[in-house]
Amino acid sequence: MAKGYWVSAYRTISDPEKLAAYNKLAPPAVRAGGGRVLARDGLVVAHDAGIAERTVLIEFDSFEQAVAAHASAAYQEALAALADGVERDFRIIEGVD
């Protein structure tokens, strides 16, 4: 079974307080959903149309698990706290076997 990944590239952070509230709620929700943070807040070199802003990579044991974790009540609560505090490109992708 192929792993699943959350890839989140932040374009802008307009409200650091909302991001801080999200950062308190999201990690426990991700862990509860089986996610493991592989990269967060490190150095970024952007190419093409990329923006060298905050980037997060989270791994799940399966694509289905990644989708379910995003839909969970705990993660939806984190998203509500984040609201319009950031603009980001968030994707759930399937890994290769």
Image (cartoon, rainbow, N blue to C red):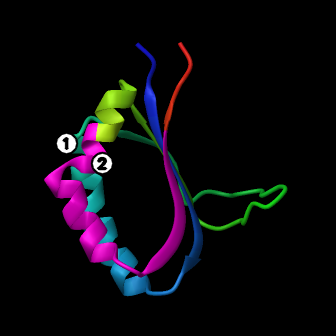
Q: Which residues are magenta?
A: 68-92
Q: Nearer the viewer, residue 82 or 17?
A: 82
Q: Give the SS element for disc 2.
A: helix
Q: Give the CA separation, mark 1 to mark 2.
A: 11 Å
**Residue 74's spot in the image, x, y percent?**
17, 56
**Residue 11's spot in the image, x, y percent?**
61, 71
- Asked whether 61 falls inside the magenta stretch, the response is no
Q: Which residue is mark 1?
A: 32
Q: Residues within 10 Å of mark 2 (few under 14, many from 20)?
A: some
Residue 70's label in the rendered image is: 2
> Does the CB distance between marks 1 and 2 fall below 8 Å?
no
- Asked whether 91 falls inside the magenta stretch, the response is yes
Quarter assignment of residue 69: top left
User: Left or right of 78: which side holds 37?
Assistant: right
Tell me the kind of residue under disc 2.
Answer: His
Quarter assignment of residue 15: bottom left
Residue under the point 75% across and 60% down: 50
Q: Establish if 35 lies above or below 42.
A: above
Among numbered discs 1 and 2, the one appearing first in the sequence:
1
Residue under the point 71% across and 65% down: 52
Tell me the kind of residue under disc 1.
Answer: Ala
Residue 48's label in the rendered image is: none
- Report the number of discs: 2
